[in-house]
Image (spheres, grey):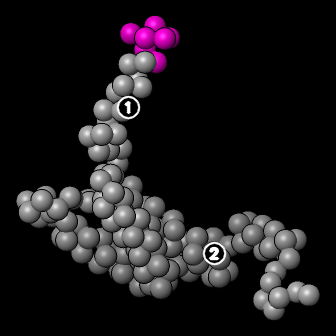
């Protein structure tokens, strides 16, 4: 009745536990170079954004660090001690899709939001202040 390739829960739990505690991948030189190239390309791509009405999606150091962690996590899933260019490419693709999706919905990165969301947040904040008596 088992489907070929299906992993039982106990085996999966042992795999995750092993990977989490025994595998600590680090970025390879090739992966670091690829990440550097992608970082520069993303910064240049959005450097002039905003002038033609397109929303700018800057990549911050914090997001760069997140891409590194995702790359290392992807390497960990294959029990690799090195995060390669392939892992970096997958992480960058996830970043691009998630940030561009957020931008297309009118959201901005790093805590900024759309004017409608900001107005709603201000309204909720005022209600909380009125009820709690803050400030």
Separation of marks 1 and 2 at Cα, in angstroms: 39 Å
Residue 127 visible in the displayed image? yes
Question: In this picture, is 119 found above or below 69?
Answer: above
How crowded is the residue under tag 2: few (<14 C-alpha within 10 Å), some, or many (20+)?
many
**Is label 2 in a helix, a strand or a loop?**
helix
Q: Quadrant of the C terminus?
A: top left
**Is label 1 in a helix, a strand or a loop?**
helix
| Image position, residue 102 (x, y; %) | 36, 58
Does residue 133 appear to the left or right of 99 in the view shown?
Answer: right
Does residue 25 appear to the left or right of 123 in the view shown?
Answer: right
Residue in the foreground of this view, choosing between 133 and 11 = 133
| Image position, residue 95 (x, y; %) | 40, 68
Magenta residues, as a range?
Answer: 128-135
Q: Quadrant of the N terminus?
A: bottom right
Return the residue at label 2.
76
Q: Is residue 38 magenta?
A: no
> N-terminal of the two: label 1 or label 2?
2
Label 1–label 2 contact, CB within 8 A: no
């Amino acid at each position: 009745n088992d489907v070929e390739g299906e992993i039982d829960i106990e085996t999966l739990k042992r795999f995750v536990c092993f990977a989490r505690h025994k595998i600590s991948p680090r970025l390879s030189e090739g992966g670091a170079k690829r990440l550097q190239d992608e970082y520069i390309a993303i910064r240049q791509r959005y450097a002039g954004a905003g002038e033609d009405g397109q929303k700018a999606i800057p990549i911050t150091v914090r997001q760069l660090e997140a891409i590194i962690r995702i790359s290392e996590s992807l390497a960990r899933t294959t029990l690799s001690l090195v995060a390669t260019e392939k892992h970096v490419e997958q992480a960058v693709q996830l970043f691009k899709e998630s940030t561009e999706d957020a931008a297309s919905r009118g959201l901005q990165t790093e805590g900024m939001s759309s004017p409608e969301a900001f107005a709603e947040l201000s309204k909720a904040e005022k209600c909380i202040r009125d009820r709690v008596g803050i400030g």
